[in-house]
Image (tube, grey):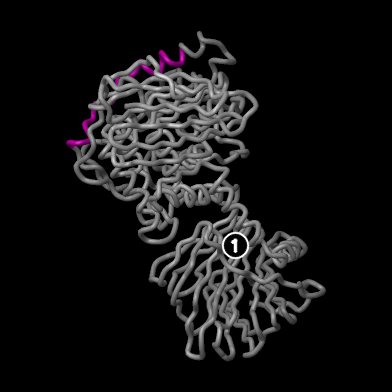
Amino acid sequence: MTHAPDLALPRSPQLVAPLQGPSDTLAVAGAARPRPFLLTAAGASVRGTETRGIEGVESGGRMLLGRVEIRGATCGNVLLAPAQARRELLGRGGSLIEILLVTSDGFSAQWTPASGSRPGDVELSLLVPGSAWRTDGPFLVAMEGSVVRLLHLTPEAEWSVGEARGALAVSARIGSGEGAIRLLAAVGERAQDAEARVARLARGGEARADGELQAYRSRRLTVRTGVQELDDALAWAAVRLDAALDRDAAQVHDLAADEPFPFDPDARRGWTALGALAAGAPLDAPIALRSEIEAMVLARAATWRGRPLPDAIAQPWIEAAMAGVPAPPAREVARRAALLALADAVEPWQGKERAQAMRARATAAAAPTVRAGTLRLPTLGGGVTGDPIPAVLAAALDLPGRTRFLAPLDDPPPGLLRALTAWACLNELDLERGFALFRAHLADGFAHGAGLWPDGSRIHDPAAAALVPLVFLEGLLGARGDAHYGRLRLAPRLPPHWTKLGVGGIALRDATVRLDYEGEGGSHRFRVAQESGAVPLMLVFEPILVAAADCAVRIDGEPAQVDVLSIAGRTQVKVHLPLDREREISIG
């Protein structure tokens, strides 16, 4: 490691805005436990252990810091939000309040003495990638090839730089009585890039982070049940998905490199994008076409958002799928489902004949015949006695003509497989089993860390998080979109013990729709309203309920004659209504 006194440094220190820590918009509080935590923003993340410290900070697809900790301190209580944290650090001389923030620009931290505490000198320990370095006043700059990492620490510290694990082992000692300690860190291709990011970090970022959390509570797919596990999980999952969709975070899926379809990296990228669409994310980035699941993303972007199908990449994939090259059973199921979804997407533009040819090819292959209830569901990467995955996929993707899926007796392991099985059960109207598995998947996101959906050996997998909004929207609410013709189908199949539900941010084309439900004593009342959009949508409403087969139906307070079916021991009502005003449907 080389001390390089000619490395460029900023001319003057920044005036750093104080950090206040997370608000209660979306946060988890409690005593610190020896479990992981993860803070995420677009293209950036902070990971660590609640009781110890930060173990890694990434920004722009690069490791920014390898370790950040106050020497000799442990954590007592912790408040975690998706991009922020507040921790109470306990040391021999007193306690400090630590506030952490990650943004797309980099990392900010602040340490202040707790009220009535005098912690004495503070030693900050950091691991900084780099081979050449320079310190001057509040600044430390580290070079690794052409990459520049810039640290800004106030008040001025006594720096000490050594070597550890091929990186710079940095110690900064700040004297007692100096007030709040503030650290900013950023990385860039050039010194001026890192300096510009540090300048933006100095101006704060908390207000923007809090504002974004408010959006996840109001302008995205949201749910209000009074069950915190469900209400919060949807928002946490949406935040995690936005961070994972950033170009600099895409490599997180490569951690599943040794896993089979549909758990491989390309399929996981597809699941993540599908979940983001369900959650109401813009999904502005171009979509690759490396797997059948990503083909479904193209179709969903067209049928839900009205996004034009990119013919340059979609048509070659469609032609290859139509050619019918043999594929393993799981891939064949996904290919058929993708062809059916793409047929819906191309029909308005290429005509019914083309769409029908695609549907004919999709339905030509035999449906899978695996009865998952008789098989041991695999742990990913392990051996399998018979492969239940095609049957799980066929039911989850609602493939017509499939053999009925029977749920396994034992719960699948946490992660993508558990969520897909829940989705499959809901589509087969095995509602109690499906909802139990979905609740388990929601709980997985908070069992071993706040907003962390584990999968295999990974503490958090974006694709597993993606199944939270996807299963909720398409599995529990039975939502289907037709953006071209402005039709929204909702077929909610709610647990019978639910008496109240509010869902907002159901997005179709440029419109958003709200659904409210109240149920008591065998009577059910739904209110559906379009809250934005230039043209009223047509609602195809087909709830599946515990109700008498001869139940009375009222629309906007008036008796109505509608189709009523018995299905899987429940009653389904079918109603078509324009959403030109709030509509009320009462059943029972």
- Displayed quadrant of residue 166: bottom right
Q: Is residue 523 found left or right of 530 in the rendered image?
A: left
Q: Amino acid at mark 1?
A: Val
Q: Position of residue 340 (x, y in %)?
A: 44, 21
Q: Position of residue 550 (x, y in %)?
A: 27, 19
According to the picture, the residue beneath numbered tag 1 turns out to be 102
* SS for dot 1: strand
From this viewpoint, which residue is outermost toward the top? 353
Q: In percent of the image, x 49 and y 43: which residue is there? A: 222
Q: Is residue 536 found left or right of 91 in the rendered image?
A: right
From this viewpoint, which residue is outermost toward the left? 374
Give the camera-side residue of 155 and 480: 480
Taking the image as drawn, is residue 131 in sight? yes
Q: Is residue 183 above or below residue 307?
A: below
Q: Which residues are magenta?
A: 357-374
Q: Is residue 544 above or below residue 120?
A: above
Give the camera-side residue of 294 and 41: 41
- Of the 4 image quadrants, the one containing the C terminus is top left
Q: In percent of the image, x 67 and y 59: which residue is there? A: 105
Query: Of helix, strand and loop, which mostly describes the magenta segment?
Result: helix
- Displayed quadrant of residue 392: top left
Q: In percent of the image, x 45 and y 52: which residue is there? A: 232
Q: Is residue 545 above or below residue 146?
A: above
Q: Is residue 112 above or below residue 231?
A: below
Q: Is residue 368 magenta?
A: yes
- Displayed quadrant of residue 350: top right
